[in-house]
Amino acid sequence: MFSVPSETLQITIDSLTGLEGKLVVSLMNPMERGDFFKYAPPPEEGSAALQLQRMLPDSRVIAAFNNIPAKQWNQIAEILDYSVCVCGDDEEGGKKSLWNW
């Protein structure tokens, strides 16, 4: 699962190995920091997941769980009661990402 700031994505990818053939789930949304977070313009690929797929051409990338607010992930004791959007061209990967939760 990837949930890293856009500005550190390339250096993060460069530091990893062994993702070939793996299912990679992107929780990322392009955001900009200021006094508060706001959505940034999408990358030229059209979405953070498509950008990640370009960077990891030998991996299977889907986008999921990125509609859940980041602060909710910190509430470990609380049940996350959300509908989850899963997007991608890998139907099997989408099913696996949901079944493991």
Image (cartoon, rainbow, N blue to C red):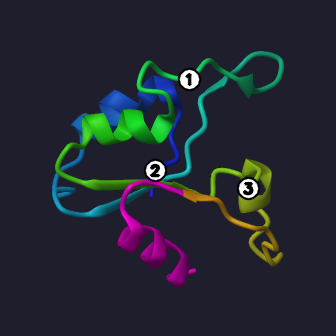
Q: Earlier in the sequence, mark 2 or mark 3?
A: 2
Q: Which mark is residue 51?
A: none
**Vertical relation: 93 (above or below) 38:** below
Tag nearer the camera, 2 or 1: 1
Mark 2 secondary-structure assignment: loop
Locate the C terminus and report the quarter of the image it occupies. Answer: bottom right
What secondary structure do most residues of the magenta stretch adopt? helix
Residue 53's x, y, as percent? 32, 42
Disc 2 versus disc 1: distance between alpha carbons? 17 Å
The amino acid on which the numbered mark 3 sits, given as a three-letter code, is Ile
Mark 1 secondary-structure assignment: loop
The residue that label 1 is drawn on is 42
Q: Earlier in the sequence, mark 2 or mark 1?
A: 2
* Residue at 44% from the left image edge and 54% from the top image edge: 88
Locate the N terminus and report the quarter of the image it occupies. Answer: bottom left
Q: Are marks 2 and 3 in contact (CB under 8 Å)?
A: no
Q: Are marks 2 and 1 in contact (CB under 8 Å)?
A: no
The amino acid on which the numbered mark 1 sits, given as a three-letter code, is Pro
Report the magenta residues as a range: 87-101
Q: Nearer the viewer, residue 69 or 88?
A: 88
The amino acid on which the numbered mark 2 sits, given as a three-letter code, is Phe
Task: Locate residue 72: give its quadrant.
Answer: bottom right
The residue that label 3 is drawn on is 68
Q: Residues within 10 Å of mark 3 (few under 14, many from 20)?
A: some
